[in-house]
Amino acid sequence: MSIYWERCSICGRHRPTRQCWLHPERIICPYCCLACPERSICPRPAWFPTLRHVQPAAKPQPKLEEARRALEELLRKLEGG
Ligand SMILES: [Zn+2]
């Protein structure tokens, strides 16, 4: 898909644009594409398709870790009598 520097069909500004997948008659800039309410149902957003289902990277959860440590400590105490 080519990138053109044209007038965005949505905001009317001259920006890099691509053709909208859902509405081929429109050309959209990245900003309007990201802000598009139909983005969640768009099978192929013209801009940043990989950002469609952004999820925070899995991080160790400090609270869970803390709880696990507390439990282990408790078990040790019980085992130790
Ligand atoms: Zn725009």
Image: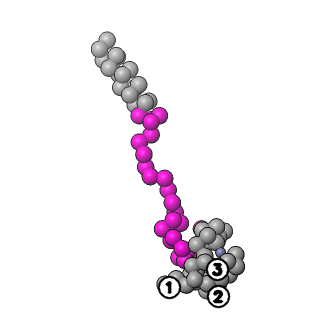
At a point 66% along the width and 68% down the height, the residue shown is 37
Farthest residue toward the bottom? 25
Task: Judge from the rendering whether residue 71 lies leftward or rightward of residue 20; answer left or right.
Answer: left
Residue wearing tag 3 = 14
Farthest residue toward the left? 80
Residue wearing tag 1 = 2
- Amino acid type of the residue tagged 2 in the rendering: Glu
56 or 74, which is in the foreground? 56
Local secondary structure at mark 3: strand
* CA gap, disc 3 and disc 1: 16 Å
At a point 32% along the width and 20% down the height, the residue shown is 76
Local secondary structure at mark 1: loop
Q: Which color mode does the image show?
A: one colour
At a point 70% along the width and 79% down the height, the residue shown is 12
Q: Residue 66 in the image: x percent, y percent?
A: 43, 30
Instruction: Give, as a single range, the part of the protein colored magenta.
Output: 40-65
Residue wearing tag 2 = 25
Local secondary structure at mark 2: loop
Q: Residue 2 in the image: x percent, y percent?
A: 50, 85
- Amino acid type of the residue tagged 1 in the rendering: Ser
Quick check: is 66 in the magenta stretch?
no
Q: Is mark 1 within 8 Å of ligand 1?
A: no
Residue 77 quadrant? top left
Front disc: 3 or 2: 3
Farthest residue toward the top? 81
- First reached walking from the N terminus: tag 3 or tag 1: 1
Task: Judge from the rendering whether residue 4 lies leftward or rightward of residue 63; answer left or right.
Answer: right
At a point 51% along the width and 65% down the height, the residue shown is 51
Quick check: is 54 in the magenta stretch?
yes
Evaluate whether residue 24 shows in this view: yes
Evaluate whether residue 10 shows in this view: no
Q: Residue 9 in the image: x percent, y percent?
A: 68, 81
